[in-house]
Amino acid sequence: MRQLTSLDAQFLALENSRQTGHVGSLAMLDAATAPDGEFGYREVTRLIEERAPQLPPLRWRLAEVPLGLDHPYWVEEAEIDLGYHIREMALASPGNDEQLADQVARIMSRPLDRARPLWELYVIEGHESGLVCVLTKIHHAVIDGLSGAEIMALLLDLTPEGREIPPVSEDEDLADPPPTGLQMFTLGMLGLPRYPVRMLRALPKAIPNLEDTPFGIFPGAGTLSKIAGKLSRDGVERPDLTAPKTVFNGRVSPHRRFVFGQLPLSEFKAAKNNHGATVNDVVVAVCAGAVRRWLIEHDDLPETPLVAQVPVSVRTGEQFGTFGNRILLMAAPLFTDEPDPVERLRKTHEALAEMKDRHRALPAELLQDANNFIPPAVFARAARLTFGFSTSRPGRPTWNLVISNVPGPQFPLYMAGARLEANYPVSVITDGMGLNITVMSYMGHMDFGIVADRDQMPDVEVLMGYLREELEALEQ
């Protein structure tokens, strides 16, 4: 068995009747390149069955420790009930993008069953383009962005013909024996003495950088962090970023809205070259312009910049294949207060360069260390309290929204012979942060996936049009 880290467990702890902790992607595939032009539920099921031995997270089932004495464990099952995890459906005519986005939003609004491995896969046919859609849904406790890409790399091939998969030895037993309640209780009791030790080890690096964690929203955290930073060499100076409250920084509902679309990578590169920036600078500046326009339209534009959460991987080469979460959640100003698109890009370039310097100086295990202050028995309650405080009257959000740019391959990939035409990310929103814009580059285009709370941003689909217009404004 493999124990979840405190960071993995945090994505389980944030879940309640309104929040879910899973992520996913919407892949659009062309069946014409598959053998005999056949690609659908049957072919996807066969592919997963064939490659399951190389995909341990698809067999991991959660095993809770009684009384919450310790963080849960992953128990590896021998067989996967593919009939449960892989599902098929079809869009009603005409099968347009709006219908597909609505189905994705409904599917992603539903929690995963914790009694089974925490993933689902939907094969969706009937799209007006003729492409077959494959929606993956997997819990964030299992993967982060890079480990999710590792899973996709095992499902996707460089050619339509696929590749040889090494056979599993008959003597190789992939399963863990099912643990008894007594065994889990014993593991929990044995783990209790470790937590004071972990907390003491985490103190020197975590306290000086507390503002760069979700706990930075609590009164006194900033002062404590600054004092500890002056007394320690481990403190990293943080810019004065205070997130204002907007309409999408309240308590989220159980329902989601999803919108997706493509923009040409060449236009981002042209803007990057014209203005002496990076592609990521252009992505963030264009997102700032689009969000600014939405806030103006709803008479909710703050006078100060918003604060974007930018997830950054700290996974080393030795940690590839270990799955789980190895990330930092960085804060960067989003210059929604700047009306000029070129000046907004210049400010964004300077702010993100500063963020990169801060990222290099921060301890890689900062989030892990900060979570180690909380005993497992009260971990879930403390995590929910953190999110709840950000939406309370005296509280404020740590971040206003998530913006994530994931570089992808610029060569074609295939699933069971079907060519991947687009891959739109579908990510998480939480209390205090009801908007997530994630983009992945692939084959010369940028695939945007935008998730928002259905009640806070019922018209979130206008953001894709705003993104296009903001990119054009930079070109002009």
Image (cartoon, helix red, strand yellow):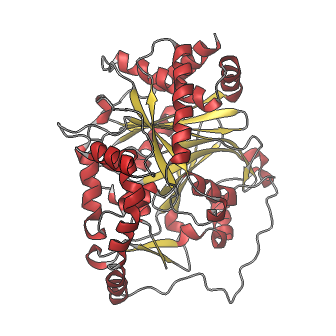
The residue positioned 69% from the left and 69% from the top of the image is 50
Looking at the picture, how far across and down is residue 265, in whole percent?
68, 29
The residue positioned 58% from the left and 13% from the top of the image is 473
Location of residue 433 with respect to 269 vertically, above or below: below
Looking at the picture, how far across and down is residue 13, in whole percent?
33, 59
Q: Is residue 125 left or right of residue 372?
A: right
Looking at the picture, how far across and down is residue 154, in whole percent?
68, 60
The residue positioned 28% from the left and 30% from the top of the image is 245
Looking at the picture, how far across and down is residue 266, in whole percent?
71, 26
Placement of the C terminus among the 4 image quadrants? top right
Q: How many marks?
A: 0
Q: Residue furthest left?
A: 393
Q: Residue furthest top?
A: 476
Location of residue 450 with respect to 470 vertically, above or below: below
Q: Is residue 448 left or right of residue 253?
A: right
The residue positioned 31% from the left and 49% from the top of the image is 215
Residue in the foreground of this view, choosing between 26 and 445: 445
The reply to whether residue 91 is in sight is no
Q: Is residue 184 left or right of residue 272?
A: left
